[in-house]
Each structure stands twice: as C-alpha cells, then as structure tokens.
C-alpha cells in the first residue's frame, strides 16, 4: 500500500492500492504539478522509484528541481520521459546520465508510441535497480490533448494505467480543468481510479479526493 | 472444415514446404491463406485477415517492404515477422507485432497467433469501452444528479461499462508485458505521422 497522507492530509489516501491511477484536476496555477511532484518525492524518501513524464519542462529542469525536493535522499532512482516538442539538443542525453537517473527523450507530446517506449525503458531501469515499488507522474494531459484528441488520450490513459497496475506502481496525472469542455473532463476522469480536485479557496489552496473511498472527502487545506 | 467465422491467418512464405507445415498446424482452428511471395501476399490481404505470418527474407519484395505496405493500407491485422536469426533491432520500435525465429515449433506458432488475436480483441474492447464512456459522459454533463439516479438508461450504461472494464482487465493479463503495452498504444494511434 502507498501512503499519501503526509502529502494530502486525509485518511482517503493513507492506503492507496498498488496499481491505482489518480487524476489531479484543477484550474491553472493551483499547484497541481507541485502536488504530483510532492507525491513522487514522498515515495523517493521511502526508497520508491520515481518516474516523471513531462510535456512542458525539460529533463534537465525536472532533475534539478527534483534533487532539491528530495535533498538528502540516498540512492535516488529517477526516470524522466521528456516529450517536449522542442526536441532534445544538449543537456542530458539518452544513456549519458549519472547512476540512478534514466532519461528518455521523445520528439512530441503527441508521439504516444515514443512515450510508451520511454516509459517502458524507464520502468525496466527502475526495476533493474531494485525499485519494486514506485510512483509515476504525467504532467500534463492537457498538453497531450492539444496534440491529439480525447479518444486517443483516454485510451492511452487506460492502457498506461493497466501497465502501471501490472508493475505495482501508482500513477498521478495532471489536467487543467479550465482548458477543456465538460464532456472531455468527464471522459478522461473515467480512465482513472480516483480524482484529486484542487482549487484556490478563501483560505488558500484546497483539495478533495473522490473515487478512492465511498464518498468525496471535504475540501481541506493543501 | 474450419467454419467461416474462424479468424483468418495469411502465410507469406517463399518455401512451399514450410508454408504447408504452418498450414497443417493452423488449419484446424483458422482459415488459412497462403502466398508464395510478397506481391501475392499483398493481393491476398484484405480486411478479413486477422494475422499475417510474414517471412522476412524472400526473393522479390522483402518482408520489411511488405510490412510497410500493409501499414500504409491501415488494415487492422497483426503481423508476426518470421526471421532466420534473432533480430538484433529493438522489436518495440519496429512496426510489427511479434517475431518468430526459424525453425518454428508448432506450439510456438499457435501461441503467437493466439496472442496476436488477443491483442486485437483488446483493441476492440477498448474501442467499445471508449464509446460507452462517451455516452456516459454525455448523460452526466446533460442531466442533474437526481435525474441520473432515476435514469434506467444510465444505470444500464454503468453496468455495461463495469463489465467491459472487467473484460479488459482479463484480456492480455491486463497489459502485463512491455510488448503488449507498446502494441496496444500503437493501435490507439497518435503516432507522430498521423
């Protein structure tokens, strides 16, 4: 079981079953990405593997931020699939990385096969390094939706969730709820076991969890 | 006699004895078509074909060229490449779904064909699942919670969706291995070229 309750203070996430995929949805600038990264970082502090699939940030930036986030952790096992359309060029290249770091570059957020191969290679490397448990973050589905369409993204999420389930990993996927119509959001939600909604409340950032326990949790401060 | 609903396997193989051997192993459960070279293979290929066993080394069109044309025609068939040696390339990045190294044993051949058919089943189920999820989302965005709770149509839809989820999780062991994962994604589309 994965315990996310130190990141998100609710019982609903204190025992998350391996193989669970969770959608993190909220308007722009509400800390979805940082929540996803913190869920991964908490795992790294416990020796879990971490895998980031990024459509916006470069592998170099992700690695740097992540190292800061988990400062002091020994034997960090981090995989990054960098699928920005800008392409590679400089920095961390495939295969030329320090121990414990696995980077795979893909030419576009719409190249799902490439992303799938990147994820497969990173999972293989993480498993090879002994990370039997691990957490994956995909940031963000909104970008993938602009490169493809919701049918493709829905199916991709379903297949990827199944793969994570087989690996015993958990996954968190972010989506900007303000960037898509209701139909799209409803369809994408169905590909996941649970949903974390975030918003800017009166008292600051708030989150609630749905789908992992019987009813939705109350909004609580993040 | 194989019944006409049985899956169709196309064997593209330039050695008649080898093709006939495969035919013997498969004919009981599948409708088999045999082609002696790449051109004939492409002639005998249509939407009914489920699995192609494609010899890589043939006079005339090579297996790779045939594969390329098959993909261009966007038929839903699965392709197992038959090679003389273990391929040294990354199978995940090639456009075929499986490979077999000669000499092939009967169990190996049958297992591969079954696996490829299961992947096709998975794609069909996923397509059906997606269509139902779209319907469900349409109802959810158009109706209030109270209306949904009273809707028979909605309840039935939810049941069918749950059934399909179960079926999907039992097909291919729920996308257990890497090759299943990659081919399932390839089938979704969203490759760079499309």
Image (cartoon, rainbow, N blue to C red):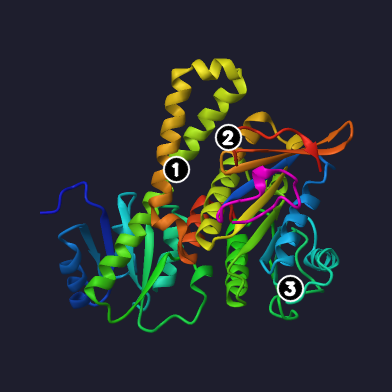
Farthest residue to the front: give it. A11
Label 3 lies in what chain? A
| Magenta highlight on residue A17 | yes
Residue that carries the numbered disc 3 in the rendered image? A76
The quarter holding residue B8 reads bottom left
Cα separation, mark 1 vs mark 2, equals 19 Å
Q: Are marks 1 and 3 on the same chain?
A: no
Chain part drawn in magenta: A1-19
Q: For this rendering, which residue is in front, A173 or A95? A: A173
For the residues tagged 1 and 2, is the chain the same? Answer: no
* Image spot of residue B1 (x, y percent): 10, 54
* Residue at 50% in and 60% down: A166
Question: In the displayed structure, would residue A189 be above or below residue B105?
Answer: above
Q: How many marks?
A: 3
Q: Is residue B95 visible?
A: no
Image position, residue A112 (x, y; %): 60, 56
Element type at mark 2: loop
Within the image, what quadrant is residue A103 found in?
Answer: bottom right
Q: Which mark is residue B109?
A: none
Q: Nearer the viewer, residue B23 or A175?
A: A175
The residue sitting at 61% across, 56% down in the picture is A170
- State the CA–CA distance, disc 3 to disc 2: 35 Å
**Which chain does the residue under circle 1 lie in?**
B
- Residue A91 can be seen in this image: yes
- Could you say whether the residue bearing mark 3 is in a helix, strand or loop? loop
Left/right placement of residue A172 relative to residue B68 reads right
Residue visible at 21% across and 60% down in the picture: B32
Give whichever of A20, B39 is nearer the camera: A20
Residue designated by label 1: B165
Describe residue B140's horizontal placement relative to residue B73 as left or right. Answer: right
Q: Earlier in the sequence, mark 3 or mark 2?
A: 3
Horizontal side of B84 relative to A114 (left or right) equals left
């Amino acid at each position: 079981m994965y315990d996310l309750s130190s990141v998100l203070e609710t019982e609903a996430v204190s025992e998350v079953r391996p193989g669970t995929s969770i959608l993190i949805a909220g308007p722009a600038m509400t800390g979805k990405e940082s929540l996803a990264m913190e869920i991964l970082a908490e795992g790294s502090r416990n020796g879990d593997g971490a895998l980031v699939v990024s459509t916006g940030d470069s592998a170099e930036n992700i690695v740097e931020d992540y190292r800061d986030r988990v400062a002091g952790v020994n034997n960090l096992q981090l995989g990054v699939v960098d699928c920005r359309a800008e392409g590679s060029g400089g920095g961390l290249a495939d295969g030329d990385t320090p121990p414990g770091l696995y980077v795979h570059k893909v030419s576009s957020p719409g190249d799902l096969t490439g992303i799938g191969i990147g994820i497969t290679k990173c999972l293989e490397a993480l498993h090879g390094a002994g990370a039997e448990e691990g957490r994956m973050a995909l940031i963000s589905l909104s970008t993938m939706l602009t490169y493809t369409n919701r049918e493709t993204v829905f199916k991709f999420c379903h297949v990827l969730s199944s793969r994570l389930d087989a690996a015993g990993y958990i996954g968190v996927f972010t989506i900007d709820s303000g960037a898509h119509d209701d139909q799209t959001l409803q369809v994408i939600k169905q590909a996941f076991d649970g949903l974390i909604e975030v918003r800017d409340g009166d008292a600051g950032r708030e989150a609630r969890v749905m789908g992992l326990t019987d009813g939705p949790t109350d909004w609580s401060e993040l | 006699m194989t019944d006409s609903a049985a899956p169709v396997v196309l064997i593209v193989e330039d050695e008649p004895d080898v093709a006939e051997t495969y035919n013997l192993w498969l004919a009981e459960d599948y409708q088999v078509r045999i082609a002696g070279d790449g051109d004939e293979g492409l002639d005998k290929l249509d939407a009914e074909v489920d699995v192609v066993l494609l010899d890589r080394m043939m006079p005339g069109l090579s297996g790779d060229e045939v594969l390329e044309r098959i993909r261009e025609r966007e038929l839903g068939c699965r392709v197992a490449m038959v090679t003389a040696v273990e391929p040294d390339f990354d199978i995940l990045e090639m456009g075929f779904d499986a490979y077999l190294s000669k000499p092939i044993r009967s169990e190996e051949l049958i297992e591969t064909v079954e696996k490829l058919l299961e992947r096709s089943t998975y794609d069909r189920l996923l397509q059906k699942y997606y269509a139902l999820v779209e319907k469900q989302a349409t109802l959810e965005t158009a109706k209030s919670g109270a209306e949904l709770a009273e809707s028979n149509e909605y309840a039935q839809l939810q049941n069918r969706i749950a059934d399909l989820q179960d079926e999907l999780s039992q097909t291919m062991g729920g996308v257990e291995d890497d090759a299943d994962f990659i081919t399932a994604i390839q089938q979704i589309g969203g490759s760079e070229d499309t």
